[in-house]
Image (spheres, rainbow, N blue to C red):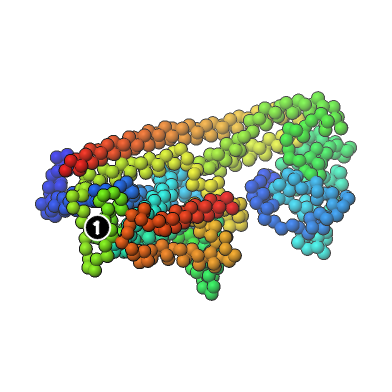
Amino acid sequence: MKRGLLFVSVALFWLLPVGLALAAEMPETVCLQCHGGQAGPLGAPVKAWQGSVHQRNGIFCHDCHGGDPADFANAMSPARGFVGAPEHAAVPEFCGRCHVGVLADYRESLHGVKLAQGGAQCVTCHGSHAVKETSLELINEQSCTRCHDYGRAAQIKTALAETDARFAGFGEELERLKKLGVSVAAAKGALFDLRNRYHRVFHSFNVEKVRAETGRIASELEKLRNEVAGHDARFSQRKLWGGIVIGLLLVLGVVLLQVRHTYEEEERDR
Amino acid sequence: MRLVNLLIDFVDRRLGVREIFARELQGYLLPRNVNAWYTLGAVLITLFSLQILTGILLLIYYVPHADQAFASVQRITNEIPYGWLIRMLHAVGANVIVIALLLHMLSVLFMAGYKGRRELTWLSGFILFNLSMGLCLTGYLLPWSQLSFWATTVATEAPGAVPIVGDLIVEFLRGGATVGNQTLGRFFALHVVGMPLALLGLIGLHLFCVKRRGISPPPFGADYRRSELPDTFVYEKHPGGIPFFPNYVVKDAAVICFFLALLLGIIFFAPGLFFPPSAFDPADPFVTPPGIKPEWYFLWAYQTLKIFPSELIGLGVQGAFMTFLALLPFIDRGPERRPARRPIFVTVFFLTLLIFLGISVWGHYS
């Protein structure tokens, strides 16, 4: 059950292309139609949401706050599932309905343990409405020192940085192979899983755990990179053999044209 | 070699094949000024043969069902030994065939090869061209990718603009209201059985027409002759001409080599040329990929439908143009074939070509 929820949460978060397509296709919800035209605090969430990771992935107001996005009269009806905005301490549960795995790691972290004493929760770092996706940039001195000193956070950021660099451009590498006809569904699934594990470990705020888990992730990522390198080597080999065959065909064509010239000379002499 | 000679002797004693060979190939004389454009027929026969061979090999592993078609093509490309090569030869080969067909038709048009009681040769060739387009269209759906699905949806939507029977035509083409497994089934049957059989029959008829009436000589040089419209059947002879075998066959073979080099060049060095990204995602009827366009050779038709205020007018213009092209030998009956003496025809020829290229480029970027 937990694994199922985890999969759903990760799928909701990372199905970017599908989300983009849906975002492009989906008509404006009544929430956006009404709040989008308002000034002040009632309209601000819509402006903040525009360009957020949620908006880019097709996550609309009703996906978090509930209600009926197609019915003005019942848009904020509790009977239609409207839940409004959560209190500070309820935010992790609120976000964790989708981000199940992250919630589990967060709860075990110092942030989660200190929640009742005003400890940081999701929006403290990611913001609300203008939600930012998990990235190394979110861990910075200015942000972390709002609550505590930066030392431990800096150690975690250093431990994460090397793995973060390993992910860079790998998705694009797989897309490049896909455009060459290579079946990358399994590799993309594995990368999806590794990214998810990587983003989860962000939330543990445990230096040892971060180091151990990022080490495992890096090793598995290396295996995937070797697979890509294997495909590239195969394509290089194909190009070599293809080039030889093409060269032979061109030479044969030129030789045949020369034979034709000799026939032409005979035909002229006749 | 001795064994081959023995075999030929065996058949010759029974069927006289050496006599047929000497009469039909060595004794078959072509005009002395025959040029490289005349090799395109042999190029096309080679490419069509390659399509049949690779098509049969693909049939071994391809599964014509919406649930399995995409996975079976992925398997062919990624798991079956040399499956990628066979699939690429088939898919890229189709595009190279369209290039060769267009060049063949344009050269015949420019040299007025359809003149002199060659209406049946032209008509059979014209139908062959359209049948090849049909093969491309039906083959496009078979990989059941996003590109296949949506390009077929767009293509089969167009006849819907025809009044009264439009919806019926769309339903007939799709086998239902929308593109689905039933569409895949009928396109598959047409692509692997119906259309290839018709194609083979038409190639036979086309070659028969060419051979029976005699090759139309190029309208250039000192050997130029005006086209005749004899009242009775006449075989156009080329006395003192070039023997087809071996003199011209070597040129055919040379150009075939160059076309095969082009085909392999695309496969090995530009494999993505004819495959947009949506060709690698499985069909999803609920997600329309952005910027779906038909193949390059259908872009002119696609854009024509968008230029006119209604699709019906666009379809009408396309139909009128294709009908005019089909009936051209019956309309253009003058004896003159030299392009230099046909300024109006040559101007219209190049203007039409430019308009087609322009509309296709417009369609690509629209």
- Residue B28's place in the image compared with B160, above or below, is above
Q: Quadrant of the N terminus of chain B?
A: top left
- Secondary structure at badge 1 equals loop
Residue at point 28%, 60% (across, down): B227
Residue B25 in the figure: left or right of residue A95: left
- Residue A124's place in the image compared with B146, above or below, is above
Residue B257 shows in this picture: yes
Disc 1: which chain? B
Residue B57 shows in this picture: no
Residue A89 in the figure: left or right of residue A258: right
In the image, what residue type sits under mark 1?
Gly
Frontmost residue, A135 versus A252: A252
- Residue A122's place in the image compared with B229, above or below, is above
Frontmost residue, A243 versus B185: A243
Residue at point 29%, 39% (across, down): A257
The residue singled out by tag 1 in the image is B214
Residue at point 23%, 41% (across, down): A264
